[in-house]
Image (cartoon, grey):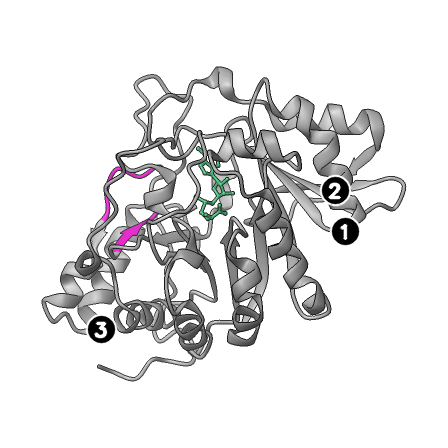
Amino acid sequence: MTEPAATPSAAPLVDGFGRAIRDLRVSVTDVCNLRCTYCLPESGIAWLPKDERLDDDETVRLVEVLAGLGVTTVRITGGEPLARSHLPALIERIDAVPGIDEISMTTNGVLLNRHADALVAAGVKRFNVSIDSVHARRFAELTRRDVLPAVLNGLAALDPYRDRIKIKLNAVALRGITEHEAVDLVAFARERDLQLRFIEVMPLDADGAWTEDHVLTGEEVRAIIHEQWPVDALPRERSSTARVWRFRDGGGEIGFVSSVTESFCGDCDRIRLTADGQLRTCLFAHDETDLRGALRAGASDDDLVAMIRGAVAAKQWGHEMHKPGFRPPERPMSAIGG
Ligand code: SAM
């Protein structure tokens, strides 16, 4: 294997629309310990066989190659990333890759209590913890698991590190449900001085049951919040998925990831690596590039670079959710990596 470069070794990774790729989402497992209704089916899930998943060496090698092409940030996701064993050891290795500036993680928080110390020590700088309700019964209905106390303990386990890490909360907004949850979620976040982000539900559920009727829009949630705590818009940060608003009373900020109603594809800088080593250049792509197959067939770094460049050159403009004939991707969010 060639030595990884400390700075982009060649021309940076730019797609056909001139968007430079900087952010990599690495799904470290497709396995999840929750069964969120908008993501996974209740039962009958065929998880990836172990030998189809990338091992640590393979994952680190791909991150090295991508860092050599200008990727600077890595978000660890899944499935549920904390369902993967020995995760801190992998994170420590990714953190040591020259060119990688920041590692973040998206987690449901259920196992965070057990792993928080090791994850922070390994180098995770940002945690996004998913929590769709702060009411135990509603949380259990949405996730099909009665584990809200574990999530709360997980969040508490991050408290001692607040001076070194950033924490955000993610809540998927669902029509008919989140209208009744939003104010309590916001109160919960404000009490803890955490930024909460509401995410519009996307057609990425394993059951294929999504319709536009399920989407409670960011604007609608914001109107509910604004009644109680008026907010003002902040300028949008480049390549950000969320539009951020500030509470007028000084109570912090709140974000809206309005993936369905306010696409942010225009300056997307993201690509994704699935747990089975497929490169996806868009959450909604139908094509994947088989980097695992190439690695296992003995591909050189140059071979991998050529495959990655080819895939990125063909990155689609956006999600096309509103175009007639739209087809959701073949894999649900849990298998792609959120
Ligand atoms: N298990 C981790 C978690 O719960 O945060 C990481 C993976 S999960 C797929 C990442 C994020 O995607 C979570 O915030 C989850 O709520 C969100 N998500 C899952 N399915 C979604 C969908 N159909 N639409 C919008 N967001 C979704």
Q: Secondary structure at mark 1?
A: loop
Kind of residue indicated by mark 2: Phe
Left or right: residue 185 compared with residue 105: right
The mark found on residue 31 in the picture is none
Q: Nearer the viewer, mark 1 or mark 3?
A: 1
Q: Which residues are magenta?
A: 278-288
Which quarter of the figure has residue 235?
top right
Residue linked to disc 1: 192
Please say if the residues under marks 1 and 3 sit with CB atoms less than 8 Å apart. Answer: no
Q: Secondary structure at mark 3?
A: helix
Q: Quadrant of the N terminus?
A: bottom left
Q: Position of residue 104 (x, y in %)?
A: 53, 61
Which quarter of the figure has residue 207?
top left
Residue linked to disc 2: 188
The mark found on residue 301 in the picture is 3
Residue shown at the point (47%, 67%) measured from the top left: 72
269 in relation to 124, above or below: above
Mark 3 and ligand 1: say if the CB distance to the nearest ligand atom is below 8 Å: no
Q: Position of residue 134 (x, y in %)?
A: 66, 37
Q: Position of residue 70 (x, y in %)?
A: 42, 67
Please say if the residues under marks 2 and 1 sit with CB atoms less than 8 Å apart. Answer: yes
Mark 3 crowd level (few <14, some 14–19, many ≥20, 10 Å Cα): some
Which quarter of the figure has residue 187?
top right
Specify whether residue 21 is in view: no
Residue situated in front as seen by the camera: 309 or 190: 190
